[in-house]
Image (spheres, helix red, strand yellow):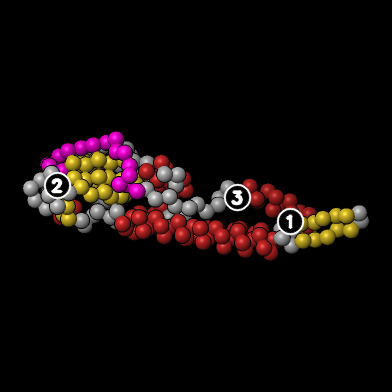
């Protein structure tokens, strides 16, 4: 039984290690180079897709793709003669279709790491190390440290990464911002089911 249990853990190790929790690397939309630009109704828009993947946030990028969401960094300049409120005055379009940016909490809930999902690391708690010297075999219950350690470590890493993601989404939430005449703002938005269509802004 002990031997079979160890074989089980040996096969489980590559799977568990391949699903380690990931840290979060901020997008920082103010530091990006924007390759796509649009000017309409006096509003200048620059935007960039795939910002999670580009910053090395592979786990979040995979969730983004599986949920049909595009997390996009944007830069908006108000070239009109009036103050513009994003929620009140601006319509978002993907191609010819009007789209509605997601609230930060909705983006977060869709792509965050599932913290309890790292509980299977507790399987390591049953891992024993057997050392045979001559006719004697000593058993070391290394799993009692390894299992809880990996579990707690991964859960703390995932929770911290999710918190940093939420903080940045809130920091760059532009959905209710006033944009003064001549002002440029940077933001992060989430759009559903838009593929990689051109994005534009229009005044209501």
Q: Would residue 120 be seen by someone viewing this image from the given angle?
A: yes
Give x and y (percent) for residue 162.
43, 57
Q: Which residue has dot 2 on it?
A: 182
Q: Is residue 191 left or right of residue 10?
A: left
| Number of numbered labels in the structure image | 3
Q: Residues within 10 Å of mark 3 (few under 14, many from 20)?
A: few
Residue that numbered label 3 is attached to? 17
Q: Earlier in the sequence, mark 3 or mark 1?
A: 1
What is the secondary structure assignment of the residue under circle 1?
Answer: helix
Label 1: few (<14), some (14–19) or many (≥20) C-alpha neighbours in 10 Å: few
**How much space separates mark 1 and mark 2, taking CA atoms?**
67 Å
Which stretch appears magenta?
28-43
Tell me the residue at 7%/48% (across/down): 81
Q: Residue 125 or 80: which is nearer the viewer? A: 80
Secondary structure category for the residue under label 2: loop
Residue 39, image x and y in percent?
Answer: 17, 38
Q: Secondary structure at mark 3?
A: helix
Farthest residue, direction right = 135
User: Which of the marked residues, 1 or 2, is nearer the chain's N terminus?
Assistant: 1
The residue wearing badge 1 is 5
In the picture provided, is 6 more to the left or to the right than 171?
A: right
Nearer the observer: mark 1 or 2; the answer is 2
Of tags 3 and 1, the one toward the viewer is 3
Which residue is found at the position 77% from the left and 61% from the top?
140
Quick one: which residue is furthest to the top in this view?
A: 35
Residue 141 on the magenta span: no
């Amino acid at each position: 039984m002990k031997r079979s249990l160890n074989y089980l853990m040996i096969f489980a190790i590559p799977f568990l290690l391949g699903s380690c929790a990931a840290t979060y690397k901020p997008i920082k939309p103010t530091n990006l180079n924007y390759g796509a630009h649009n000017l309409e109704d006096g509003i200048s828009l620059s935007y960039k897709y795939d910002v999670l993947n580009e910053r090395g946030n592979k786990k979040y990028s995979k969730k983004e793709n599986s949920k049909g969401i595009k997390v996009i960094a944007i830069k908006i300049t108000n070239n009109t003669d009036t103050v513009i409120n994003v929620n009140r005055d601006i319509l978002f379009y993907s191609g010819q279709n009007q789209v509605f940016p997601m609230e930060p909490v909705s983006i977060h809930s869709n792509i965050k790491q599932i913290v309890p999902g790292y509980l299977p690391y507790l399987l390591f708690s049953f891992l024993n190390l057997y050392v045979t010297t001559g006719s004697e075999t000593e058993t070391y219950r290394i799993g009692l440290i390894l299992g809880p350690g990996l579990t707690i470590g991964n859960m703390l890493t995932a929770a911290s990464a999710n918190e940093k993601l939420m903080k940045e989404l809130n920091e760059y939430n532009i959905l209710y911002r006033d944009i003064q005449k001549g002002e440029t703002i940077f933001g992060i938005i989430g759009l559903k089911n838009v593929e990689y269509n051109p994005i534009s802004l229009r005044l209501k």
